[in-house]
């Protein structure tokens, strides 16, 4: 495993922990989004489409945070689940590159 992939994997695991904190209500959507956007090595190690999808999910997460109740457009739980799916797929891509 090269250094770039190692850093990307470390960032992926950090993002996983941050997602667990978000799902448990221990982190705000904005804090999670800022942290996710800061993981440049992770995004660089993945195909460009992964970055596009993650940024779209983060935009929806931030927009949904403006609502105190679940709305039909922005389900917090649904977004957390989608982010988990993204992490699972990204983990598979990184593992295949190792």
Image: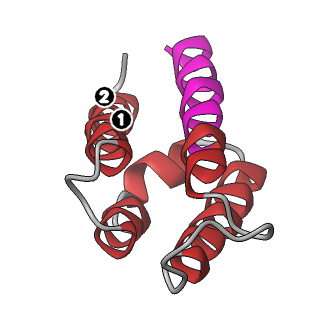
Residue furthest out toward the bottom: 66
Q: Quadrant of the N terminus?
A: top left
What residue do we see at 61% from left, 42% from top?
46
Q: Nearer the viewer, residue 73 or 45?
A: 73
Q: Nearer the viewer, residue 71 or 61?
A: 71
Tell which tag, 1 or 2, sits nearer the viewer. 1
> Disc 1 on helix, strand or loop?
helix
Lower sequence index among marks 1 and 2: 2
Is 89 contained in the magenta span? Answer: yes
Q: Which residues are magenta?
A: 83-98
Residue highlighted by disc 1 = 16
Direction from residue 44 to residue 16 in the image, left or right:
left
The image quadrant of residue 29 is bottom left
Residue 6, horizontal then vertical, whole percent: 30, 28
What residue do we see at 38% from left, 36% from top?
12
Residue 84, horizontal then vertical, whole percent: 55, 34
The rendered magenta stretch, by its main secondary structure, is classed as helix
Direction from residue 27 to residue 61 in the image, left or right:
right
Residue highlighted by disc 2 = 6
Query: Looking at the image, is 1 positioned above or below residue 8?
Result: above
The image quadrant of residue 97 is top right
């Amino acid at each position: 495993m090269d250094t770039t992939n190692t850093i990307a994997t470390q960032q992926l695991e950090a993002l996983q922990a941050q997602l667990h904190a978000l799902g448990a209500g221990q982190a705000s959507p904005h804090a999670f989004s800022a942290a996710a956007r800061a993981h440049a090595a992770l995004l660089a190690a993945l195909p460009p489409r992964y970055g596009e999808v993650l940024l779209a999910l983060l935009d929806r997460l931030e927009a949904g945070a403006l609502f105190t109740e679940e709305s039909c457009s922005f389900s917090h739980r649904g977004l957390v689940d989608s982010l988990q799916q993204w992490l699972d797929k990204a983990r598979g891509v990184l593992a295949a590159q190792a």
